[in-house]
Image: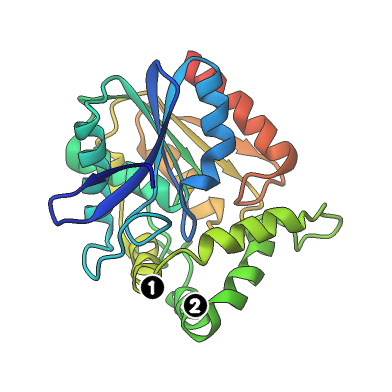
Amino acid sequence: MGNSITTRDGTEIFYKDWGSGRPVVFSHGWPLNADAWDDQLHLVASHGYRAIAHDRRGHGRSGQPWQGNDMDTYADDLAELIETLDLRDAVLVGHSTGGGEVTRYIGRHGTSRIAKAVLLGAVPPLMLRTDANPQGLPIEAFDAIRSGVSADRSQFYAELSLPFYGFNRPGAKVSQGVSDAFWLQSMRVGLKGALDCVRAFSETDFTEDLARFDIPTLIAHGDDDQIVPIVAAGLESAKLVKDATLKVYPGAPHGLVGAYKDEFNADLLAFLAS
């Protein structure tokens, strides 16, 4: 199947490992897997970096345990991968739920092995609306995701690709191929892991984790993100991370596509080289 590690609780974690040089470790969003990062993996490996991306437990080619589908364990799985490969001076890049994973990793494990971080369309500090987080989304929004996944996950994922990539916007250039790839990756998530991960990405509060960041951090977010709206996410995280660089992409959706992907790729290379 390829490269994998086995975590302390016996879960197999699949990962890709391309190129050589300073390690750049990518964490993917829900309900995808490491394939979502293939363009960026190829890009950075072609520019003299070692590109690594794993499938989160429950997702893709990794194991599908009943237990451990929570942000603390996701972060600990990432730590085991980093430690097993003995990565140092690494750059962590997380999209969406993966941005939460990166953030919780730094909160739990610190930055002794980490040089920089990139949070792209990431879920921190907190997606759920609470009294302290009035700009978040109501619990009903996440209940609807769980209901859709439980009732007909294949149709739900097919429809989710449209707002994910902004294909539902007037004048959008729709790629059926991108939507099909999204569906294919999504269908490789086990139902238990998929449902548990909704709670993990929506109800985990990363405020204290963000306060522990002490490395250069790029916070990048599209201002037309319909999945993780920027107002309670990227804009707030940029206030909490010391000396963060905030990059807002006007009109950009949640998923990397088209001109947005090209612009982020250029920004990623520039940030790695800085």
Residue 34 screen position, x and y as percent: 46, 46
Q: Is residue 210 left or right of residue 45?
A: left
SS class, disc 2: helix
Residue placed furthest toward the bottom:
151
Vertical comparison of 256 with 163: above or below: above
Vertical comparison of 9 with 81: above or below: below
Mark positioned earlier in the residue sequence (1 or 2): 2
What residue is at 21 percent from the left and 26 percent from the top? 86
What residue is at 77 percent from the left and 54 percent from the top? 175
Residue type, label 1: Leu
Can you identify the residue that label 1 sits on?
Answer: 195
Residue 46 screen position, x and y as percent: 55, 20
Q: Are marks 1 and 2 in contact (CB under 8 Å)?
A: yes
Can you identify the residue that label 2 sits on?
Answer: 149
Sort mark 1 into few (<14), some (14-19) or many (20+) by Cα contacts within 10 Å: many
Residue 147 screen position, x and y as percent: 48, 83
Closer to the camera in the image, 197 or 9: 9
